[in-house]
Amino acid sequence: MPTITVLPHHSICPNGASFELAEGDNLCAGLLSHDVPIEHACDMSKACTTCHVVVRKGFNSLDEMDDIEADLLDRAWGLEPDSRLSCQVQVADEDLTIEIPKYTINHASENH
């Protein structure tokens, strides 16, 4: 099973995290189930950018994003060439290292 490494984030995951997910698992759901409380204001329906991550390792193993995800990412804070919406990432057969950007465009964080 691929290992997911989350780089430290000042408030969401100060010490970073590492865990395994099965191939085909949803990245956002996997983060949440492993106590990484990433924002997901639209409940993973591909309607916002609060679950934006930058894939530092393993990006090329992922399926290509569709036009809707690409359009949404244009509004994300800290967009980089290897940015993805974690709610749209299905884990492939390679390890991933992700970074959660410092900010989101969400004006109010909600407890999900």
Image: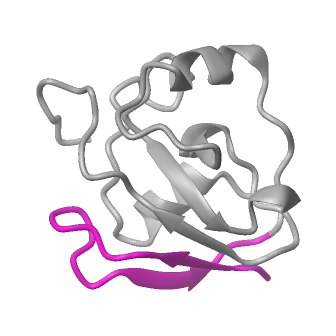
Q: Residue at x 18, y 42 (%)?
A: 111
User: Of residues 29 and 74, which is closer to you in this image?
Assistant: 74
Q: Quadrant of residue 12?
A: bottom left
Pinpoint residue 104: horizontal percent, then vertical percent. 28, 36
The structure residue drawn at horizontal position 74% and vertical position 59%, both measured from the top left corner, is 59
Judge left or right: residue 46 versus residue 6.
right
* Quarter that holds the C terminus: top left
Name the residue rendered at 15%, 35% in the picture: 109
The residue drawn where x is 75% and y is 50% is: 90
**Placement of 103 over or under 92, stated as above or below:** above
- The stretch of residues the image draws in magenta is 1-22
Closest to the observer: 30 or 56?
56
Q: Quadrant of the N terminus?
A: bottom right
Residue 67 horizontal/vertical position (percent): 75, 15
Q: For residue 69, which quarter of the picture?
A: top right
How are the colours assigned in the image? one colour
Q: Is residue 22 left or right of residue 4?
A: right
**What secondary structure characterizes most of the magenta part?**
loop
